Image (spheres, rainbow, N blue to C red):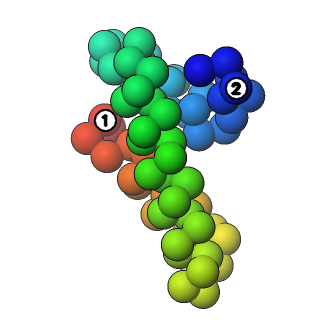
Amino acid sequence: MAKFENNYLVNYLLTKLKENNDPRARDEEFVIGRVELAAAEFEAKRKDGYPADAAHESAMQVLTEGIE
């Protein structure tokens, strides 16, 4: 996960998982997969004409689904 170490989405997700003592914090495949889904959501929303803040909110929902 070294190439993602300074990635906002990775850092945010890992923080949430660790705060909740979620063992998925050590699952690189889960983390990268969830980050990729969130990034794709952001991109799709922007392509559909959503403003950046709305696209970001939607991406964050995808990122943290089932965690909070």
Residue 4 in view here: yes
Q: Quadrant of the N terminus?
A: top right
Q: Residue at x 44, y 30 (%)?
A: 31
Residue 42, position as x, y percentages in the image: 56, 64
Residue 35, position as x, y percentages in the image: 50, 42
Q: Residue at x 60, y 86 (%)?
A: 49
Q: The disc labelled 2 sits on which kind of residue?
A: Lys
Label 1 sits on a secondary structure element that is: loop
Q: Residue at x 66, y 38 (%)?
A: 8
Mark 2 neighbour density, 10 Å: few (under 14) some (14–19) many (20 or more): few
The answer to whether residue 51 is above or below residue 15 is below
Closer-to-camera residue (12/45) = 45
Label 2 sits on a secondary structure element that is: helix
Mark nearer the N terminus (1 vs 2)? 2
Residue that carries the numbered disc 1 in the rendered image: 67
Residue 48, position as x, y percentages in the image: 54, 85
Q: Quadrant of the C terminus?
A: top left
Q: Nearer the viewer, mark 1 or mark 2?
A: 2
The numbered disc on residue 36 is none
Closer-to-camera residue (13/38) = 38
Residue 54, position as x, y percentages in the image: 56, 71
Q: Is residue 67 left or right of residue 46?
A: left
Mark 1 neighbour density, 10 Å: few (under 14) some (14–19) many (20 or more): few
The numbered disc on residue 3 is 2
